[in-house]
Image: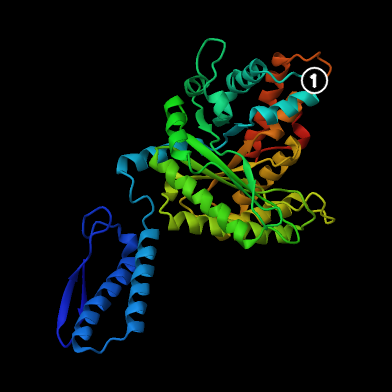
């Protein structure tokens, strides 16, 4: 590609510079506008050199030219996320994304740590032992028929290294059923000083090393959650930017290590905010997320989004119909979500199975009617699926009724799958 720049009376041809790949002119055509800007900045430097010989350029002009060049190169790079990845790596990441985003299938989120699942067990009289956690997770992964509804499962690192009754590691057992194994790599929550309760997740400093371990164990993707809360003073701009930069760095490191990043900005439902406020905050948060991902050079086609449904706060006085909530969610997606993202999996966020299914179902129905929604919209549920299962343990003397649980679990997954296709009819669906 040649750009002609006037550097005195004559016209001087300038060859396109080599990017990080080392090949001049090897960039995709979609970056032409940014490349033109970069070349213009280079040309300004050529003209500036001539001007300096004449002693006519000022220090301010030099600084301005440098700023233009930096901005042009950043814009150029943003058009080509994943430039550091090989074509084969990109194909592998995309293939995993496409399989996870299979229409009608979703994700069972079983990434609660031993402490969290222990609290849930304690409420129904089950002792929190490693064996109880193992057989419970085995039921979630190996109940016959789950592969009809699940494309993926998110595991806690502990579960990643556990085996089923046949001595097969859980990642391998999932793979045998056509279910992709993912892992939760973030560590503990850290409260930002002076940020009025806003938090960030810890664990980025050792992430690459742990991802290599998880990949060796069988994980194909990793999920990082960044929770935020709406209140009178939060989330602060600083907290939004810090969390979204963390998600972008996480995504970049994941792709470098060969795992698909699933980024999870989670606006929790606690609070009294209305639906309009929820839309505004979600748009701001996700705008910052994708901006950070582009600036970090993340390959968007090789990433997935897990996020909250845009909901009013639990203490909101206004009641909204599920159709209103569905329209708000579709509007949010259209405003900010890149079409390169293949799938969006919504968390349940403390909602019951019926609530989460009704809202996901309405969203998919609105999607079908209004169109212009290229993303597969499905579920990645933990509490919505597991709460009814754990209630079966009450009055069982501390035992896990695995047969009853597995039967109920299949009914739940059938409801979730129907909602992911806009085919859920509450009056016709029953967990009994």
Looking at the image, how many numbered discs can be counted on the residues?
A: 1
Q: Quadrant of residue 380?
A: top right
Q: Tell me the residue that label 1 is attached to.
A: 125
Q: Return the x and y of residue 88 as percentages of the image width and height.
A: 31, 39
Examine the rendered structure and indicate whether residue 10 appears above or below residue 158. below
The relative height of residue 5 versus residue 243 in the rendered view (above or below) is below
Query: In this rendering, is residue 44 above or below 107?
Result: below
Q: Quadrant of residue 403?
A: top right
From the viewer's perspective, tell me whether residue 42 is left or right of residue 406.
left
Of the pair 323 and 275, the residue shown nearer to us: 275
Judged left or right of residue 9, residue 331 is right
Q: Nearer the viewer, residue 177 or 159?
A: 159
Q: Quadrant of the C terminus?
A: top right
Q: Give x and y (percent) for residue 28.
A: 30, 57
Residue 371 % position (x, y): 57, 54
> What's the residue at 53%, 48% (across, down)?
375
SS for callout 1: loop
Task: Give the residue displayed 84% in from the left and 17% down from the top.
Answer: 395
Q: What crowding class fits label 1: few (fewer than 14 Cα within 10 Å), some (14-19), or many (20 or more)?
A: some
Give the image location of residue 23, x and y in percent. 21, 55
Where is the N terminus found, in terms of image quarters? bottom left
> Is 400 displayed left or right of 166 in the figure?
right
Question: At x 48% / y 39%, what residue is drawn?
Answer: 206
């Amino acid at each position: 590609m040649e750009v002609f720049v006037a550097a005195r009376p004559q016209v001087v041809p300038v060859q396109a510079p080599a990017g990080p790949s080392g090949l001049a002119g090897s960039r995709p055509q979609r970056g032409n506008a940014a490349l033109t800007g970069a070349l213009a900045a280079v040309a300004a430097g050529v003209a500036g050199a001539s001007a300096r010989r004449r002693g006519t350029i000022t220090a301010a002009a030099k600084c301005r030219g440098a700023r233009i060049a930096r901005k042009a190169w950043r814009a150029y790079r943003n058009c080509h996320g994943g430039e550091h990845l090989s074509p084969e790596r990109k194909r592998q990441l995309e293939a995993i994304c496409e399989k996870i985003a299979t229409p009608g299938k979703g994700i069972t989120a079983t990434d609660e740590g031993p402490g969290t699942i222990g609290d849930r067990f304690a409420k129904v009289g089950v002792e929190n032992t490693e064996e109880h956690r193992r057989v419970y997770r085995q039921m979630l992964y190996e109940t016959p028929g789950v592969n009809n509804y699940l494309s993926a499962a998110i595991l806690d690192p502990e579960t990643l290294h556990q085996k089923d009754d046949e001595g097969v590691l859980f990642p391998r057992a999932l793979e045998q059923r056509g279910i992709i194994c993912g892992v939760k790599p973030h560590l503990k929550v850290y409260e930002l000083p002076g940020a009025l309760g806003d938090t960030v997740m810890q664990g980025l400093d050792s992430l690459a090393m742990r991802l290599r371990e998880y990949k060796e164990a069988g994980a194909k993707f990793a999920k990082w959650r960044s929770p935020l809360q709406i209140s009178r003073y939060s989330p602060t701009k600083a907290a939004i930017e810090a969390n979204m930069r963390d998600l972008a760095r996480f995504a970049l490191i994941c792709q470098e290590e060969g795992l698909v990043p699933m980024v999870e900005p989670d606006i929790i439902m606690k609070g009294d905010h209305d639906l309009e406020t929820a839309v505004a905050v979600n748009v701001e948060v996700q705008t910052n997320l994708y901006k950070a991902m582009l600036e970090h050079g993340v390959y968007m086609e090789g990433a997935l989004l897990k996020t909250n449904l845009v909901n009013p706060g639990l203490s909101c006085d206004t009641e909204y119909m599920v159709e209103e909530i569905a329209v708000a969610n579709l509007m949010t997606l259209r405003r900010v979500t890149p079409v390169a993202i293949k799938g969006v999996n919504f968390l349940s966020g403390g909602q019951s199975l019926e609530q989460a299914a009704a809202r996901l179902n309405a969203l998919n129905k609105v999607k079908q009617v209004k169109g212009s929604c290229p993303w597969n919209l499905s579920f990645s549920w933990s509490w919505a699926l597991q709460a009814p299962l754990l209630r079966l343990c009450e009055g069982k003397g501390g035992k896990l009724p695995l047969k009853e649980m597995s039967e109920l679990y299949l009914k739940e997954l059938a409801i979730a799958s129907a909602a992911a296709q806009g085919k859920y009819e509450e009056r016709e669906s029953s967990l009994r």
